[in-house]
Image (spheres, rainbow, N blue to C red):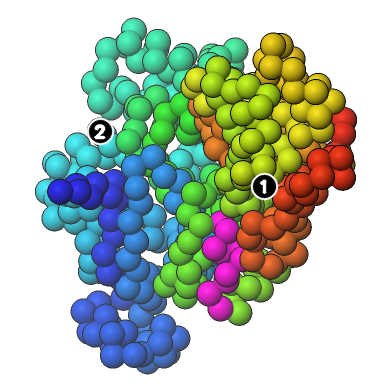
Amino acid sequence: MTVVPVPKIEVNRLFKVFGAGEEATIMQLRAGASKDDIQRRTGNIVAVNDVSFSVAEGEIFAVMGLSGSGKSTLIRCINRLIEPSFGNVLIDGEDILCASAERLRRIRLEKIAMVFQHFALFPHMSVLENVAFGLKTRGVKADVRRRRALEVMDIVGLRQWADAAPDSLSGGMRQRVGLARALAVNPEVLLMDEPFSALDPLIRRDMHRELLQIQQQFRMTIIFITHDLHEALTLGDRIAIMRNGTFVQVGTREEIVNVPADDYVAAFTKDVDRGRVLRVASVMSEADSLIIDETSPAHAEAYMRQHECTALFIVDETGRPIGLLTHRDLLRAGKDERSGIRPLLREQFPIVSDSSPIADTFGFFSDGLPIAVIDRNHRLCGKVSPTDVLATLSGRKSGRQDTELNRAPRSDSRAIAEAGGSMPASRS
């Protein structure tokens, strides 16, 4: 029997109405009344309107919307900084809307941390004291919380500023303090409300890179609020587009960009730099490969003929690529079985990570060699062809298409047009 894991966060039919008569307003919404109609007739403001979603453990769930869309109200409902009007918010299966004040306090202390747009640092405390504040509220001893605070300050590059006042730091550094304060308590859930929107573009890009690196280390469950679609697409494993208190579309970056749900989403995505936003995993296809210790030149040539490929990757026993073998290199070597396969391998060949943006592959296409795609454990998980990349960038659906390197070899091997040269490996 398959066990379906419980989502880390689950939000069901959540409403938030500001004003009197919340229940009556929700009944009107369910009957089809619009947010604007309700505000005109009653003065009530519908901030969140029947929103449901779930977030898996370790996922970054980005919510993108313009000002007034309800996204900041939504994230505050999740930890009850704002009390929802109706619905359920479950964390690890526990509905926190039913939690007592004491139980809610424990959940906030033990599971949830929040990073705000405007830093929310204590000006009378040093950077170190700010970072350690959450630990202090948990009753952690002074020497332990100092050690932990210094550890996370190392992670965000702030250790040398431990004794500085927050006001002496730049905006980017102060946001790092806020992030370090959240990380210090080792939260399971991190709520981030437009944390980088006050920063200039270069610092924002640095913070994006830093957050993704931190996420690889800590594997927190993150809900990230932003008004910037590019930021949402850069950071989110999945993205929700919010408008007028509701979710217009929820999907991966590929689904949002390639298959917008309506004209509203399409208007946001039409100018997206697909090469920078979409990931290699979305365009890769199955890679042809053989294990080094189980392969001879004759075996390799037989494989190429059977699978109609003219180049393949050679991997070690763990699945990590160690070389590229082309049919032309086999022909040049004369299939000398005594020397084995290793001397025929190109040890310098293009490699990208499956999580890299498609743009990282552009520089590798000029020599015509297939590009190896590796996972986070550096194992071969696919390959990339120029035609798949071009189809995706042009907005057409990507599919496995023939290129000079995966076209079937003819029976007359001398007629095979092989791409030559090599390129330094790029390990992302």
Question: Against 235, is 220 above or below?
Answer: above
Residue 214 pos. (x, y %) = 50, 30
Quarter holding the C terminus? Answer: top right
Q: Which mark is residue 99?
A: none
Q: Residue drawn at (42%, 29%), measured in percent from left and top?
A: 218
Residue 364 magenta-drawn? no
Looking at the image, residue 1 sits to the left or right of residue 257; the answer is left
Element type at mark 1: loop
Q: Residues within 10 Å of mark 2 (few under 14, many from 20)?
A: some
**Of callouts 2 and 1, the N-terminal one:** 2
Decide if residue 169 is on the left or right side of residue 140: right
Residue 303 is situated, as x and y percent measured from the top left of the image, at 62, 37
- Front residue of this view, candidates 260 and 421: 421
Count of labels in the image: 2
What label does residue 308 carry, if any? Answer: 1
Could you say which is closer to the camera, residue 356 or residue 150? Answer: 356
Q: Quadrant of residue 300?
A: top right
Percent x, y of residue 42: 34, 87
| Nearer-the-camera pick, 54 or 228 | 54
Residues at marks 2 and 1 touching, judged by CB atoms closer than 8 Å: no
Please give the name of the residue rendered at 66% of the width and 73% of the height, measured from the top-left corner: 267
Which element type, helix, strand or loop, lies under badge 2? helix
Q: Marks 2 and 1, how far apart in space? A: 56 Å
Q: Which residue is mark 2?
A: 110
Neighbour class for label 1 at 10 Å: few (<14), some, many (≥20)?
Answer: some
Position of 18 compared to 426: left or right? left
Work out whether residue 76 or residue 358 is closer to the camera in this orientation and state it. 358
Dominant secondary structure (helix, strand or loop) of the stretch shown in magenta? helix
Image spot of residue 341 (x, y percent): 68, 19
Quadrant in which residue 22 is drawn = bottom left
Type of the residue with mark 1: Glu
* Image: magenta residue range: 253-262
